[in-house]
Amino acid sequence: MSHSDNCLFCKIAAGAIPSRKVYEDGELFAFHDIHPAAPVHFLIIPKAHLASLAQVGPEDAGLLGRMMVLAPKLALEQGCNPYPKGGFRTVINTGDEGGQEVQHLHVHVMGGPRPWLKG
Ligand code: 5GP
Ligand code: ZN
């Protein structure tokens, strides 16, 4: 499993830095965001280091698909209300102008009753 030294989310995926875990399998890890912007707010990451969506190639299509397929399942488990009245928001920030602060690919999953924090 490739990782990047001094990458916060590699350390979280490895358990070297504690987090509130939501899900784990051989290739993916999900955990609650430390500064939630919504009543439910967790992040889905690949365990292997991938800096951002800007670095993905055709070989990552399966991984990305599995991240997206996991999102609705975990959203319901974490308390998001069912579609269509409920639902959730999925966000992938990419690069400085895309608002990415942590340089390890992550999908934000946010949901729960409105209003949410702005940001
Ligand atoms: P970005 O802005 O890169 O899309 O999102 C990074 C997210 O990671 C932010 O929402 C931020 O709150 C979250 N975050 C940053 N550091 C930590 C941490 O140490 N633990 C957890 N659980 N979340 C973090
Ligand atoms: Zn990393």
Image (cartoon, rainbow, N blue to C red):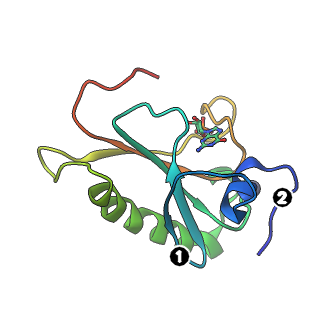
Instruction: Report x, y in % for residue 65.
Output: 46, 69
Q: Answer above or below: position of 46 versus 39.
A: below
Would you say 94 lies left or right of 72 here? right
Kindly give the residue lying farthest to the top in the view shown.
118
Which quadrant does ligand 2 occupy? bottom right
Q: Nearer the viewer, mark 2 or mark 1?
A: 2
Q: Which mark is residue 19?
A: none
Q: Answer above or below: position of 110 versus 119.
A: below
Would you say 1 lies left or right of 119 here? right
Secondary structure type for disc 1: helix
Kindly give the residue lying farthest to the left in the view shown.
85
Q: Quadrant of residue 72?
A: bottom left
Q: Earlier in the sequence, mark 2 or mark 1?
A: 2
The amino acid type found where label 2 is placed reads Ser
Residue that badge 1 annotates: 62
Q: Quadrant of residue 113?
A: top left
Instruction: Report x, y in % for residue 107.
Output: 51, 51
Name the residue located 84 percent from the left edge and 58 percent from the top edge: 4
Mark 2 lies within 8 Å of ligand 2 (Cβ measured): yes
Name the residue located 88 percent from the left edge and 55 percent from the top edge: 5
Name the residue located 17 percent from the left edge and 45 percent from the top edge: 86
Q: Answer above or below: position of 55 versus 36.
A: below
Instruction: Report x, y in % for residue 44.
Output: 52, 57
The amino acid type found where label 1 is placed reads Gly
